[in-house]
Amino acid sequence: MFVRYLPALMICVGVVFDLVTPTRVSAVPLFAAAPLIAAPFFSMASTVRTGVAAFLVVLAIRLSDGRIAEVVPITDLLTVFTVSVLSLLINRVVRRGNEQLASARVIAETAMRAVLPVPDDRIGGLLVAARYEAAQADEFVGGDLFAVADTPYGVRLVVGDVRGKGLDSVAAVAVVIGAFREAAEQELSLEGVVQRLERALAREGSRRGGLDSMEGFVTAVLAEVPAGSDILRVVNRGHPEPIVLHADGALDVLAPTVPALPLGMGLDTGPDRSDEWTLPAGATFLAFTDGLSEARDANGVFYDPAARLRGRLFPGPDEMLSALTDDVRLHTGGRSTDDLALLAVGRPSRGQSARRTTVKIVGRGGE
């Protein structure tokens, strides 16, 4: 890394500059810059060594030209010494700030991982895989969420995206995940689970004195696969459309029959409606956040997961998600601007693939 050698380079350039210029021209700014450059990037000991080296070089130059007793050389030495001391203070402030930032990051990541644990790879007889890809390296704080629960009504899952970033979004994720885990065990219908999430967000908004509808909403897809059945029910509340990839590479985009608004907007959207599909043997259900579908390449072209997956075969959900994350990283050139969450649920046994069944309209549940 170039900055690693920059302080030494500044001292060397200062020596050359001093040798080739008249005595009235001073290279002290170059020597003083060396410890200043070292301060934010190097350790305390390295900053000290850089400052000492700069001071000793200036002292040696002034001794060699016999001007050590003059006012200007003494001023030069005092300048380098003072800047070196200030560099130590800067180094201390930067290190303390980095330590505090690292501590806050660890706390936030720990909270996020507690709220959003990675699900088991096998739940209710289905294969499960999940990914959370942060837009920034080493970050794990955002508003994307997923959860899977094995309930008396089958396997139920949610994938969502809270508008916003940071710790506020983590709090909203906690509300949604907590409400989902409770409702998934208790509600008879998937629509009932959706309404429990709606009420939980409304309560949170009231507790905070009212959330701005443009800042507090959550897009979400909820799905369930009843035990011993290949039925797949899906409710979509303003979220990117999930996908079913069949064993032969055929692909269905699960567009909702009746589009619905996101959760938490405080509007009466009428009864939720679930669409009914099938998840046959060998098929995989994939839900994702807009960090995937809105990822762009250098030309501004959106990533199309359906087009990328159609016709492809994978041993299981985990391999599918690994391929997707690698592919979208290539598509964006590593320049993703939004976090993404992926959840894939597959039926492990082999069999003849099936396609979409009739659409089922169900009234509001859990009321």
Image: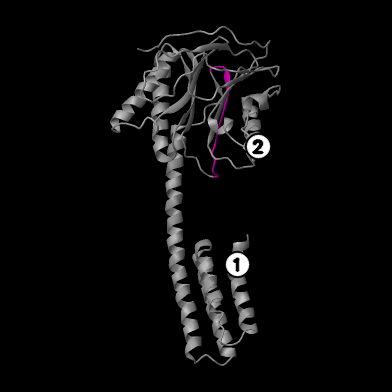
Q: Secondary structure at mark 1?
A: helix
Q: Position of residue 344 (x, y in %)?
A: 58, 24
Q: Which mark is residue 331?
A: 2
Mark-to-mark CA distance, 2 and 1? 35 Å
Q: Which mark is residue 332?
A: none
Q: Is residue 307 above or below residue 252?
A: below
Residue that badge 1 annotates: 6
Residue 126 lies in the magenta-colored region: yes
Stretch of the chain drawn in magenta: 124-137
| Along the viewing direction, whichever of 124 and 310 lies nearer the viewer | 310
- Please tell me which residue is depicted at 44% across the width and 71% down the height of the picture: 86
Q: Amino acid at mark 1?
A: Leu
Q: Quadrant of the N terminus?
A: bottom right
Give the residue drawn at x 43%, y 49%.
Answer: 103
Residue at (70, 23) in percent of width and height: 313
Of the two numbered discs 2 and 1 on the same chain, state the one appearing first in sequence: 1
- The correct choice, above or below, for 23 with respect to 36 in the image is below
Query: Count the marks: how many?
Result: 2
Residue 63 on image: x %, y %: 56, 89
Please say whether residue 79 is one of the residues in the magenta stretch.
no
